Amino acid sequence: MMKKKTGIYFGLIAFIFLLVLTACVEVPTPTIESVVEPTSTLTDVPPTSTETHPDNPHHITIIYTNDEHGYMEGINAGLGAAEMVGMWVQEFNFSEDGPFLLLSGGDMWTGPAVSTWFEGASMVEVMNAMGYHAAAAGNHEFDFGLETLTINTTEMDFPLLGANIRNKSDGTVPTGIGIQPYELLEVDGVTFGVIGLAYQDTPNVTFPDVVAGFDFIGYEDALREIVPKVRAAGAQIIVVPAHICRSDLVGLAMAVEDLGISMFGGGHCHEHFARTAGEAILLGGGGRMEGFAYAELIYDDETGTITLGDYGMMQNQPGNPDAAVVGIVEDWVAEAKVVLNQEIGYVDHTITRGSNEMRDLIAETWLWSFPAVDIAMTNQGGIREDIPKGAITVGSIITVLPFDNTIIQLEMTGEQLIDTLSVRGGELAYAGVKNVSGQWVLSETDEPLGLNASYIVLVNSFIYVGGSGYQFSEYDPDGYDTSVHYRQPLIDWITAQGSSETDPIDDNIDALIGN
């Protein structure tokens, strides 16, 4: 049986819209005694055996996902949250109160309208029903502001963890908004210390002003401070779900090998992996409910040793969906359909597809949503209709930007930007840069693009991967998928203007695009 032993939650309210393991050692510092290599590398691995084990040793399976991003329905029909739970039951005989630990690496809420429009409330309910036990705080958990984050943590049946998030004022973890440094969880009579880590570069990948009051300290520093406290509190096994990409996670696991941490989970880069690093098992679930990773830890009460059993990855598969989760998802989907008819603004003239006004409006709202970015570019082919004169609804913006594209953040040199804009600028909607007498300059400063200078750029996922012959992924193969839908900034900006029939949005548009 699993019981929470710590946790503090408080509540407020706000409103923002957004649719971006080893050798036997002496107790009490156990490490993994041995490692069982997976039957294949970074591919599906046969599931853990479901045979009944004696009470000692304890066989406990960790199931790990990350970057769920609100995809309760899945990217493709029949591959969502309900099907994921069905797989866990079929493959592992999963139950929330059984010998399982279900963890998330964070970025749970921002994504499709069914979650984003409701500021993550829908995904909180879905993940509660799925049986999650703890989650790391992802950068996108801050997307809707601190008040909404606090409301969501209050509604969560599991803690949100971020041991390296500190108040600038006093160096403490901001428990007042529902973020804890760690949680003690009892699983099958074994006490787990679950320590969460947030992405250290969070201020650059969410609204900077939202997290302005926090420092995101180094991962190793946080663990060296917190792990002794967690052991002193009674933890027998320590695991670390973290919103950290695989390459950094490997380095971290090796750097803190002496701390005896049994598992690290990743996040942020949507990577699917199950591997060892030094004495620990590292897991990454991929993202968007497309898959998960798992590992069996075997704990011996008499010796305090921890052994790594079966581990691997699986892709989500259709069939045997969990009925309770199905019902919750269906209810939220129905409510989201009502939202599509909701008015978010009013315009006194038609904004025509293909016009400079339309192109500038879309690109500028991307920069408005991502203020730390230099330049935004999206292909005109992804802009499909006019915004008609009159009331603007969520549905009308979906009609204008109908594709399932997300916004990718990458780095480009000035030379790469000049090459792209000089050849294909006429096909792009862009902002943050302009051509003055044949020279490309930054819009705000009129400073010419430096050939060897590096710039932060936003593009949509279609052209990033090579759609329409673009080569953005070649310029930066490690581009970051913000998971923010390419239409969301436009919806958010229009909503924020508070326009109406008597106070239309036209002047606001002129001010935004510099007319």
Image (cartoon, grey):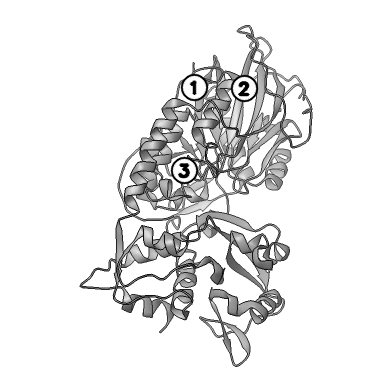
Residue 144 has which mark?
Answer: none
User: Closer to us: mark 1 or mark 2?
Assistant: 2
Q: In this view, does 391 lie above or below 53?
A: below
Taking the spot 53% from the left edge, 66% from the top edge, the residue there is 382
Q: Residue at x 66, y 26 (%)?
A: 295
Cα–Cα gap, marks 3 and 1: 28 Å
| Secondary structure beneath label 1 | loop
At label 1, which amino acid type do we have? Answer: Glu
x and y percentages locating residue 203 in the rendered image:
51, 57
Q: Tell me which label, 3 or 1, sits earlier in the chain.
A: 1
Q: Name the residue under label 1.
A: 96
**As rendered, which of 334 and 136 lies closer to the eye?**
334
Quarter holding residue 353: bottom left
The foreground one among 108 and 58 is: 108
Which residue, given by chain and number where applicable, does mark 2 sit on? 91
| Label 2, residues with CA under 10 Å away: few <14, some 14-19, many ≥20 | some
Mark 1, Cα crowd under 10 Å, few <14 / some 14-19 / many 20+, is some
Residue 139 in the image, given as x and y percentages of width and height: 51, 50
